[in-house]
Image (cartoon, helix red, strand yellow):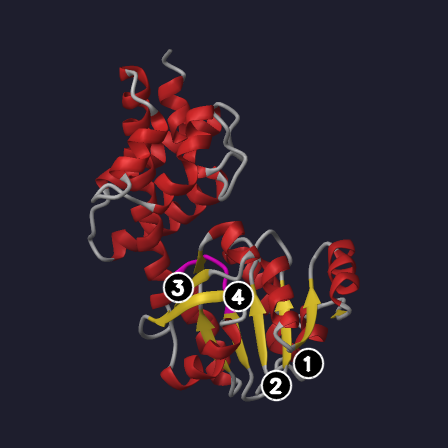
């Protein structure tokens, strides 16, 4: 079993993901741009932290990264202090960041030139999924490389799937976000409609969640949506970042996303109302505001 792991990025997702690796017996060294958080993680896990991505990656069998966007990935991956500068030949760089397929292919080319391996592996499941080790991972890369990293990812993932060559993991995540945008808007409209019509929310969801209308969002967010509470899960700012990546990719394939563009416009309104850090279920706030 590959034992030496590096984890780059200790945000709301990376912090618990790296913990799960330690709890499953892997030797983990972390790096985070905010050093105090890396020190805190290292103390909690009785593990090591590094001062640069390169330092964390030296001698690692696998380097996982989970940061914010394309620019953040480039910052930790490239340059004299980056992941590639430390990762040994034959090592694997697994990027869990939701980023562009174009960046994934760029990083894969660098890996190939250095006799290293790359997997783009965005995740779904949010903060709760990361904390509970129940993430879903969408991967792009070579089958052999995927088979090496899949058992390790199982420390924090309930399911992982190879979607095809490098870049396909990111495209799968784009499809995931497109689905979520539509589901949350539909749920917002249904709950607002039901509330105005005087239905009992609990009885309604207990009933329709058992049929074709059921969804994760319905099961996990309807109570807080009714209550106007939006301090859970995935922030609107990050959702709009993800949808922007999807729009750019869709143009390359002449794929129309009319519903997603509409919902993105609604999320923009939520931002204008100060809801940048509210979770994605805050779409209902626009409907409630019409009272």
Residue 16 x %, y %: 61, 59
Residue 281 x %, y %: 42, 35
Which comes before the other along the chain, label 2 or label 4?
Answer: 2
Q: SS of the residue at dot 1?
A: loop
Displayed quadrant of residue 54: bottom right
Category of crowding for the residue at label 4, using alpha-carbon neighbours closer than 10 angstroms: few (below 14), some (14–19), many (at least 20): many
Q: Is the C-beta separation of discs 2 and 1 under 8 Å?
A: yes
Disc number for residue 58: 1
Residue 90 x %, y %: 54, 88
**In screen coordinates, is 99 left or right of 74?**
left
Disc number for residue 156: 4
Would residue 139 be seen by someone viewing this image from the given angle?
Answer: no
Category of crowding for the residue at label 1, using alpha-carbon neighbours closer than 10 angstroms: few (below 14), some (14–19), many (at least 20): many
Q: Is the C-beta separation of discs 3 and 4 under 8 Å?
A: no
How many numbered marks does the figure carry?
Answer: 4
* Gap between marks 4 and 1 measured at Cα: 23 Å
- Magenta residues span 95-100
Mark 3 or mark 4, which is nearer to you? 4
Category of crowding for the residue at label 3, using alpha-carbon neighbours closer than 10 angstroms: few (below 14), some (14–19), many (at least 20): some
Which comes before the other along the chain, label 2 or label 3?
Answer: 2
* Gap between marks 3 and 4 measured at Cα: 26 Å
Residue topped by disc 3: 102
* Gap between marks 1 and 3 measured at Cα: 26 Å
**Does residue 291 belong to the magenta stretch?**
no
Q: Nearer the viewer, residue 95 or 114?
A: 95
């Amino acid at each position: 079993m590959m034992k030496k792991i590096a984890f780059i990025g200790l945000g709301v997702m990376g912090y618990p993901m790296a913990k799960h690796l330690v709890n499953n017996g892997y030797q983990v060294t972390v790096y985070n741009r905010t050093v105090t958080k890396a020190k805190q993680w290292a103390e909690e896990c009785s593990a090591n932290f590094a001062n640069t991505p390169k330092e964390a990656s030296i001698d690692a069998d696998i380097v996982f990264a989970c940061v914010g966007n394309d620019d953040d990935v480039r910052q930790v991956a490239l340059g004299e202090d980056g992941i590639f500068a430390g990762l040994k030949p034959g090592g694997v760089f697994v990027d869990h960041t939701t980023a562009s397929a174009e960046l994934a292919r760029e990083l894969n080319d660098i890996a190939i030139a250095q006799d290293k391996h790359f997997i783009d592996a965005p995740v779904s499941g949010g903060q709760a999924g990361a904390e509970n080790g129940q993430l879903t991972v969408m991967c792009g890369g070579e089958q052999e490389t995927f088979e090496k990293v899949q058992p390790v990812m199982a420390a924090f993932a309930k399911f992982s799937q190879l979607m095809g060559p490098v870049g396909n993991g990111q495209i799968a995540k784009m499809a995931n976000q497109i689905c979520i945008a539509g589901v949350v808007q539909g749920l917002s409209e249904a709950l607002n409609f039901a509330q105005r019509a005087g239905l009992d929310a609990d009885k309604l969801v207990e009933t329709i969640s058992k049929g074709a209308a059921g969804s994760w969002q319905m099961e996990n967010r309807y109570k807080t949506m009714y209550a106007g509470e939006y301090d859970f899960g995935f922030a609107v700012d990050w959702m709009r970042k993800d949808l922007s990546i999807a729009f750019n990719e869709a143009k390359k394939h002449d794929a129309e996303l009319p519903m997603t563009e509409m919902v993105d416009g609604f999320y923009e309104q939520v931002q204008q109302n100060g809801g940048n850090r509210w979770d994605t279920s805050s779409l209902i706030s626009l409907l409630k505001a019409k009272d």
